[in-house]
Image (cartoon, grey):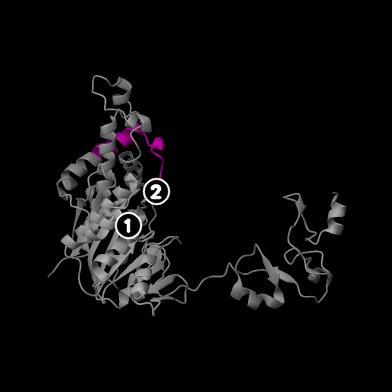
Amino acid sequence: MTLDNLESHSPQCQFFVLRKKRLCRMTVRPGHSYCGEHQPDPGADGNNVDSRIPCPNDPKHTCFASKLAKHLTICNARLEEHPAYIQKNVNTITEDSPPKKSLTEIPLLELRALTKKVNQLFEQYVQNEIETLTDRDIHPVVVEEFALSGRTESSLRHLRQVSRLMYVIEEEEMVQESTCYVELGAGKGQLSYFAWQAWCATSKNSRVLCVERASLRHKHDNKIRNILRESNPKSTNSAQANDGNISIMDESTRLRADLAHLLLHAVPSVEICKNVVGFAKHLCGVATDYSLRCLVSPGVISKTQGILIATCCHHRCQRDGYVANEHLLDLGLNAEEFNIILGVVSWATCGDGRSRSKKTEPKETSSDRSPDTTTTVGSKGLGLSREEREEIGRRAKALLDWGRVLYLRKCGFSAHLAHYVPNTVSLENICIIAKRETP
């Protein structure tokens, strides 16, 4: 079909898009040849017919000048009015830092010097400060799900971690009346669901708060709503806040927010409780630092009784968000070295170089290994063995977490690090435990 035939028979916009070499596919109003976006500007001919102008919110699209006021109220690019608990970048810092580089860009001597410094600092300050928690049976509220048939090994390992973290909160005596248990980076909220079962179901004064920036399906906090409905069929026990980002139930709240912008003390669930306990399982990188600032901010620190965060993904930390830059400087790590460490930490968890099939084979004896396997695994010709490389990565991760411990101690908490599960359950097995110091 020729372009002339297409123009005469099609009800679509007759504007030819040069970049796509076709007509615009928007439909047009009866009697018109162009869609609203491509309607020729009548003002150019001196007519008084209403003209289209670029939208003030986003000049990539236009609207009729006479309808600008109405358009601004419904424009998808309009600036949103933030609720009281959102303040842009409240949990970040403004600090210039050198750009992050790949380890392949780091000179060999510089990388070798840093690995030596990581080992020295770890052995001097951190090595004897990490507690190893004893293993325990699965927590009573987790047993039912743990025993379900068809569970994969991955899901069982996940539930073991959830169970042990719950025991830690109880062992540290963080469970109290009128407490808001805040899960930061909650995901689907499984940890919050078990926390509600264990500590809130029989207490009308305590509740759980799930904070997550993503919108997810199959959330575990929906189970709380179902349980409440079954126990009280006449009540829905839920409501939606005006801003659309907070879903409220009598004993559970889900808040859609970025931790970088969250004012925790302004969240209704926190306002009505006397105490706050913050917890998270595998909170990625800089999100851990945002969370710590949330929990020790001036408006909520007097309520914060305990903090438990299982950290992970240290390569996603950022210097402009990290809470302990000053503490690392005191230890002798500057901004450039911090950024190199963000690459070194990946050595702990990025794999050992073997394929999955090789990992299932029996371990070789030292006499069976080839020289290449034991002497060249590493980075930039450092000559590190696989085990040495992984150990340096673990030590680098622990140093970053140690800085966070020092930050919490400065804020008035008794804080320490702990291995909460064996590394056979998770390679990311360090957690930060902090309790408010009693006078």
Q: Quadrant of residue 340?
A: top left
Q: Residues within 10 Å of mark 1 (few under 14, many from 20)?
A: many
The extreme left residue here reads 439
In the depicted structure, whether residue 266 falls above or below residue 133: below
Q: Which mark is in front, 1 or 2?
A: 1
Examine the rendering and report whether any part of residue 149 can be seen.
Answer: yes
Q: Which residue is mark 2?
A: 98
Position of residue 221 relative to residue 231, above or below, is above
Q: Quadrant of the C terminus?
A: bottom left
Q: Secondary structure at mark 2?
A: loop
Q: Position of residue 133 (x, y in %)?
A: 17, 51
Q: Main secondary structure of the magenta part?
A: helix
Q: Nearer the viewer, residue 29 or 159?
A: 159
Q: Secondary structure at mark 1?
A: helix
Q: Is residue 114 magenta?
A: yes
Magenta includes 158?
Answer: no
Q: Amino acid at mark 2?
A: Pro
**Residue position for label 1:** 288
Could you tell me if residue 327 is visible in this image?
no
The type of residue carrying mark 1 is Thr
Give the numbered dot on residue 403. Answer: none
Please report the bounds of the magenta region as a residue range.
100-117
Q: Residues within 10 Å of mark 2 (few under 14, many from 20)?
A: few
- Residue 380, percent from left and from top: 36, 31
Query: What residue is at 82 percent from the left and 64 percent from the top?
Result: 33
